[in-house]
Amino acid sequence: MGLETGTKWSDLVTTNPTSSDPRSQGDDHLRLIKTVAVTMSTKSLYDTVTNTGTSATATAGVLQICTNASPVTLTMPANPTAGDLVGAVFTNNGTSNVLARNSQPIQSAASDKTLSAYVANSITTWRYVDATRGWLPEQY
């Protein structure tokens, strides 16, 4: 199997190196991990996407920056896996921004989540846990 390339966590292939990779390629794998670690430690935990509309669909590992002045509905990923992270920033100071659950629970509830004004202009991070609890807010 060839060595992957990348500069962010999502670029790493967890099944590499394979047992059939030559030992000499081990150094290349270590250098790649170091490159990603240094790159990611000097910037955000996420890739970023700016959404200007009143609705957007989130992607795991991406910070959604929602800039519309009106309330925004951010739809969570449809098929998350345990450990997936979604970041969101709403810049409209609104109290009517919504996280749409997309068939997965949010904080164990089978309903969309209307966000309080206190989350406006700050990063909220949501981690997918399982099909029962769904998306839970990260506490820092």
Image (cartoon, grey):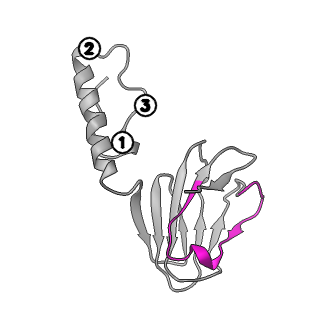
Q: Indicate the amino acid at tag 1.
A: Asp
117 falls in the magenta region: yes
The stretch in magenta equals 107-126
Residue 137 in the image: state x and y as whole percent.
Answer: 62, 57
Q: Nearer the viewer, residue 84 or 52?
A: 84
Residue 20 in the image: state x and y as whole percent.
Answer: 34, 13
Identify the element where label 2 is drawn.
helix
Identify the element where label 1 is drawn.
helix
Residue 124 in the image: state x and y as whole percent.
Answer: 55, 64
Identify the element where label 3 is drawn.
loop
134 falls in the magenta region: no
**Identity of the residue drawn at 28% across and 28% down:** 29
Residue 80 in the image: state x and y as whole percent.
Answer: 59, 47
Q: Indicate the amino acid at tag 2.
A: Arg
Looking at the image, is 120 positioned above or below residue 132? below
Of the image marks 3 and 2, the number of the one nearer the N terminus: 3
The secondary structure making up most of the magenta span is loop
Q: In which quadrant of the rendered image does the N terminus lie?
A: top left
Q: Is residue 6 visible?
A: no
What's the mark number on residue 23? 2
Of the image marks 1 and 2, the number of the one nearer the N terminus: 1
Residue 13 vs residue 72: left or right?
left
Residue 108 vs residue 88: left or right?
right
**Identity of the residue drawn at 32% across and 42% down:** 37
**Identity of the residue drawn at 27% across and 21% down:** 26
Which class describes the residues within 10 Å of circle 2: few (<14), some (14-19), or many (20+)? few
The residue to which callout 3 is attached is 14
Looking at the image, is 20 positioned above or below residue 28? above
Gap in angstroms between the C-alphas marked 1 and 2? 21 Å
**Mark 2 and mark 1 in contact (Cβ < 8 Å)?**
no
Q: Is residue 54 visible?
A: yes
The residue to which callout 1 is attached is 11
